[in-house]
Amino acid sequence: MESYKKEFIEFMVECEVLKFGDFTLKSGRKSPFFMNAGAYVTGSQLMRLGEYYAKAIHGTYGDDFDVLFGPAYKGIPLAVVTAVAFSKLYGKEIRYCSNRKEIKDHGDVGILLGSKLKDGDRVVMIEDVTTSGKSMDETIPIVRAAADVKLVGLMVSLNRCERGKGTQGALDEIREEYGMPTAAIVSMKEVTEYLYNREVNGKVVIDDAMMEKIKAYYAEYGV
């Protein structure tokens, strides 16, 4: 596993973005782990987050793209900090674009904010985590309606490695439905293997008991 992935896993735990315990997801599933990108709140955390995304995107898709698109709302700061990091790390100016939940009818009108999409733009979608793929179902039609763009791929921070709307994983469903590559900075398989019986900030977050809960969860919902 690349060193930046190991750092990112510890970073998620240290920031309390990735937690282990008993959680009820929006889908109704009872999960032993929960990821909330909204817990990145400080300048240094957001700076590091953008760099991890930039490294993963550069390693997966290169730099032959024009726009980072972050779906509202959590995708907006992700697109911004990653565009900043891409410029810093790779010297490439990438525009950012996001959608609004409501269409604005005055001033900067329309449903998009940031850079306007243009015909021929190559777009990387960026999101925190995808469980069902619902946000892409809502967002990709908006992107395609705005301009004749090429969807280079989707990058999320964590692949939960569980079923989406059907029998496949959510990222696999998105890849098939929209014909674009999908990837994650890390997968839960990598997370569990790396954190098992490992201390982060003096505490083991995945001990034998938690590992059994995770295995039981994936026996029911895994792919």
Image: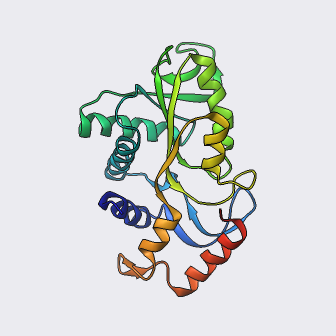
- Determine the residue positioned at 50% across, 37% down: 153
In the displayed structure, 55 sits above or below 79; it is below
Give the quarter of the figure containing the C terminus.
bottom right
Is 13 left, or right, of 221 in this rendering?
A: left
Name the quadrant containing residue 2: bottom left
In the displayed structure, 180 sits above or below 193; it is above
In the displayed structure, 59 sits above or below 115; it is below
Q: Position of residue 72 (x, y in %)?
A: 57, 36
In the displayed structure, 112 sits above or below 74; it is above
Is 160 left, or right, of 89 in this rendering?
A: right
Q: Position of residue 63 (x, y in %)?
A: 34, 33
Is 122 left, or right, of 31 in this rendering?
A: left
Q: Position of residue 69 (x, y in %)?
A: 50, 32
- Pick whichever, 72 or 172, lies toward us: 172
Name the quadrant containing residue 64: top left
Give the quarter of the figure containing the N terminus.
bottom left
- Determine the residue positioned at 47% across, 78% down: 205
